[in-house]
Amino acid sequence: MEINESIAAIQASYPSLRDHHPLLMASAVLPTGPIKEVSRLVFDRAQRFRSSIAFWAHPLCGKSSCIYALQKLAPIQYPGSAFVIYEPTSKDVAAEGALIEDLLSMIDYEPRVLRSLAGKRDQLLRALYALSVAGRHLFLVIDEAQNLHVKDLGWLKRIVNWLTTHEVKVTVVLFGQSQLCSMHQRFMAEMPDLTVRFMADLVEFRSLQDATDLRGVLKSCDEETEYPSGSGWSYTQYLWPLAHANGFRLASCAVDLYDAFRSQSAGAVDHEGISMQWVAEALMLVGQDGERSDTEGMSIPRDTWERAILDSGYRTRTPAALAATAMGRTRGRRSP
């Protein structure tokens, strides 16, 4: 298709498709450097019949975006695989029945849950097997893993062992906040075999650190994305077709975007980094004006990025270090 024809086709699709563009919905799965690293580690371990890895991060570092990306990428890397996300709640006493019921709820189990523990356990095992049997692979992601009890690991081990004896590969991925590090040390003293089983590798998941990291995100919008599916048009090309045809690329904005974040954070990004959440918000707000600003010589100046960052609510965020301290104080007040 000729460039002018592509521009006309893109613009003609705007009434029905533009508002659903992933950037404009702040729902794009973009391959950031940290997400690429996590994906590489997870899918490398997924080649083994039974494997686990744990990641910890400060609040607002973007681990939810990372989990979402893994959920999208897993069936591509391992066709037919099942992907289950379990988020344990903070509790004083661990109970196997509660764990089983939570997992059944997470997978939208429809039959009536049996009252006996043995019955519930059998229902969960067979439900997980049914989900995983097509690809013979289950990815079990535990979010907010710092809320786990050591007994929970024992019950999860039983689930993993049952599935592996039925020839289903199981990859367990733990995501937690910084408390996961101290929990790892505590569990290692109490139950070293289970801790090694599930948390032998404890890796920090970092936020975006500098303009180079941002350039990778923006470059993916230019080159590694497509909207709508099958069109061959990148995210950037779709939002700014005329500017794109004349050489505009979002990657060229990386330094201005980083400097804008740095300015709006009073320099705090130098030590706390930038969560993908805020990058997505800024891209959404700038992209919303794309149809009006799309010209042959278009550029996105730093003050435009600064206005978007300000409008996103970024300045009201709780920096990672302060959030971690606040949570520690909360836990201290609740401790007997």
Image (cartoon, helix red, strand yellow):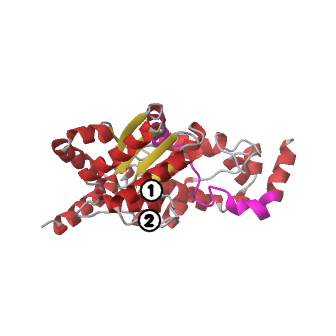
User: Label 2 crowding class (10 Å Cα cut-off): few <14, some 14-19, many 20+?
Assistant: some
Measured as percent of width and height from the top left, residue 5 is found at 87, 47
Per the rendered image, the range of residues in magenta is 13-40
Quadrant of the drawing holding the C terminus: bottom left
Left or right of 240? Residue 258 is left
Amino acid type at mark 1: Gln
- Residue 151 is marked as none
- Residue 113 is marked as 2
Residue located at (51% from left, 54% from top): 279
Marks 2 and 1: in contact by CB < 8 Å?
yes
Residue located at (53% from left, 49% from top): 130
User: Label 1 crowding class (10 Å Cα cut-off): few <14, some 14-19, many 20+?
Assistant: many
Query: Would residue 16 be seen by someone viewing this image from the given angle?
Result: yes
**Real-space CA distance between mark 1 and mark 2, rounded to the nearest whole angstrom:** 8 Å
Quadrant of the drawing holding the N terminus: top right
Residue located at (65% from left, 43% from top): 222
Against 107, is 70 above or below? above
Q: Which one is nearer the viewer's eye here, 282 or 185?
A: 185
Amino acid type at mark 2: Val
Measured as percent of width and height from the top left, residue 246 is found at 75, 43
Q: Which element type, helix, strand or loop, lies under badge 1?
A: helix
Which residue is the site of mark 1? 123
Residue located at (28% from left, 59% from top): 322
Could you tell which of marks 1 and 2 lies nearer the N-terminus?
A: 2
